[in-house]
Image (tube, helix red, strand yellow):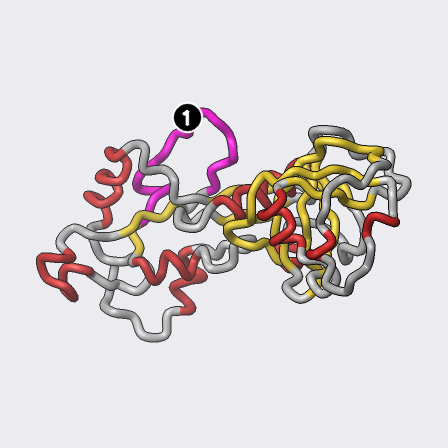
Amino acid sequence: MSSFIIPSNKNKYDATNAFNDLDTVHWVQHNNKSVKIGDTIYIYESKPTQKIILKTTVIERDVYNYHINDAKYSVTGFDFSSQGPWFTLKLVKNANVNVSLEDLHNLGLKGNIQSLRYLDDAIAKAIDVISNDTSELTSVKLIEGKKIQFYTARYERNSKNRQACLNYYGYNCMACGFNFERMYGELGHKFIEIHHRKPLFLQNKEVAIDPTNDLVPLCSNCHRMIHREKTNIITLDELRRKVLIPYTNFD
C-alpha cells in the first residue's frame, strides 16, 4: 500500500471535527488515478497550523454519490458535494504529536503541499514514529538522500544493558553533571535516564547493544534537549557544548 499527503484549510473546512464526528468523509478526487483503496492519506492542515492533523485510509474511490452529510463543517458555506468524484476516507487516528511542514522538509519532502502528493515509505514511517511517540524520546534523521535513521530510548527491554551502563558511568548526567540524589536526597537515589547514542532502525528484530558505547546516562532535562527537534537529533558532544552552567564535573 502507498501513502499520500493532501492539504486542508481549516478556514474553509473543519476536517478534524468532521472526521472525529463522522469517522468517514468524502474528499475531492479530481483526476487522480494513482490512489488505491487501502492506501493511507495524511491530512495536512495548511492553514493555520501547517501541520499533519489526521491519518486516514481510502475505503472508496470514484464516488459520484455524495452521501455523507458534512455541510456543517464547511466554514464558508461552500457546497463540497458539487466537486465530484470523491474518495471516501476513514479516520485512522488523530496525530498525537503534529508533524510540521519543517519536519517534512527535514525528512526530505520538497516544496509546499498544495495538492495530493505521494510520500515514499521512509517518510511515511517517520511520520508514524513522530505522531505515535509522545514520551519515549524517539527522533528521526534523514541521511544519504532518502535513508532515514531512528534514534530512540526504547532499549529498556533488556534491563541488564541499562545496569551495565550505570555500573560503568554512574548516576551523574553525562552532559551537565546533574545528580538526582544530590539534589533530591533519597527520592533521587539511583534515578537517571538512559539515552541511546546510536540509531535503532525501525524493525522488528533484536538489536545488539554495547552498554558502554551505545548507552549513556542523562538527566531528564538534557535528554529532552537532545530529542527536542524530532527530525534533527543532536549528539552528546554537541549538547555538552550548549550547556551554559554545568552542574558539576562529570569526568
Amino acid of disc 1: Glu
Q: Which residue is the extreme one toward the top? A: 205
Q: Which residue is the extreme one toward the left? A: 186
Q: Nearer the viewer, residue 107 or 136?
A: 136
Residue at image position (50%, 50%) is 96
Q: How many other residues sit within 10 Å of disc 1, few (<14), some (14-19) or many (≥20)?
A: few
Could you tell me residue 215's position as x and y percent? 34, 44
Task: Please name the residue that numbered disc 1 is placed on.
Answer: 206
Predominant secondary structure in magenta?
A: loop
Does 100 appear above or below 32?
Answer: below
The image quadrant that residue 29 belongs to is top right
Residue at image position (37%, 42%) is 214
Q: Nearer the viewer, residue 236 or 201?
A: 201
Q: Nearer the viewer, residue 26 or 246?
A: 26
**Quadrant where the C terminus is found in the figure:** bottom left
Give left or right: position of 102 versus 78.
left
Could you tell me residue 127's position as x and y percent? 59, 45
Q: Is residue 205 magenta?
A: yes
Residue 107 seen anywhere in this rendered image of the structure: yes
Give left or right: position of 185 versus 215.
left
Q: What secondary structure is found at the residue carrying circle 1?
A: loop
Could you tell me residue 14's position as x and y percent? 67, 57
Q: Is residue 36 magenta?
A: no
Q: Which residue is the extreme one toward the right? A: 31
Give left or right: position of 23 versus 136.
right
Does 21 appear above or below 45?
Answer: above
Find the magenta span and give its range: 199-216
Total marks in image: 1
Could you tell me residue 241's position as x and y percent? 41, 67
